[in-house]
Image (tube, rainbow, N blue to C red):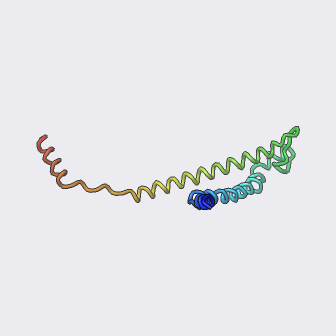
Amino acid sequence: MGMLKEFRDFAMKGNIVDLAVAVIIGGAFGTIVSSLVEDVITPLLLAPALEAVHATDLDKLVWNGVKYGKFLAATIKFIFIAFVMFGLVKSMNRMIKKEAAKSAPTPAPTPEDIVLLREIRDSLKK
């Protein structure tokens, strides 16, 4: 029974739950990016290149049995995912820095005796 309780405690930690949510959202985001590449970018931007090689689908580009079209589509998807993730992380870091600057503790005021000692020191230097 102790092992089951230990596993439950492990599984219910905040980091594990956050990771599970991130994986699920990442999977959904992957399908969105796949649709963006296949349904928007390929027809709009890659159509002239595909027409030049007499192909209608990027995934069907084959040369001597090598499916380089699928590789090209996967590379484009990766670049888009990496770019969007870079933007998200950059904006999150910016928001975290702003939040940290807002919540940074103000320094405690210098005690009066220290201020007086500094004034005496400065007047002695003169």
Q: Residue at x 43, y 56 (%)?
A: 100
Horizontal relation, residue 57 to residue 37: left or right? right
Judged from this view, the residue extending furthest toward the top is 64
Horizontal relation, residue 56 to residue 4: left or right? right
In the rendered view, would you say 106 is above or below 64? below
Horizontal relation, residue 56 to residue 21: left or right? right
Nearer the observer, 73 or 106: 106
Can residue 42 be seen by looking at this rendering? yes
Task: Pick the quarter of the image with the N terminus.
Answer: bottom right
Q: Position of residue 98 (x, y in %)?
A: 45, 56
Nearer the observer, 69 or 53: 69
Q: Position of residue 103 (x, y in %)?
A: 40, 59
Q: Position of residue 64 (x, y in %)?
A: 88, 38
Can residue 18 be seen by looking at this rendering? no
Q: Residue at x 26, y 56 (%)?
A: 109
Q: Residue at x 72, y 56 (%)?
A: 36
Horizontal relation, residue 57 to residue 94: left or right? right
Nearer the observer, 110 or 21: 21
In the rendered view, would you say 108 is above or below 53? below
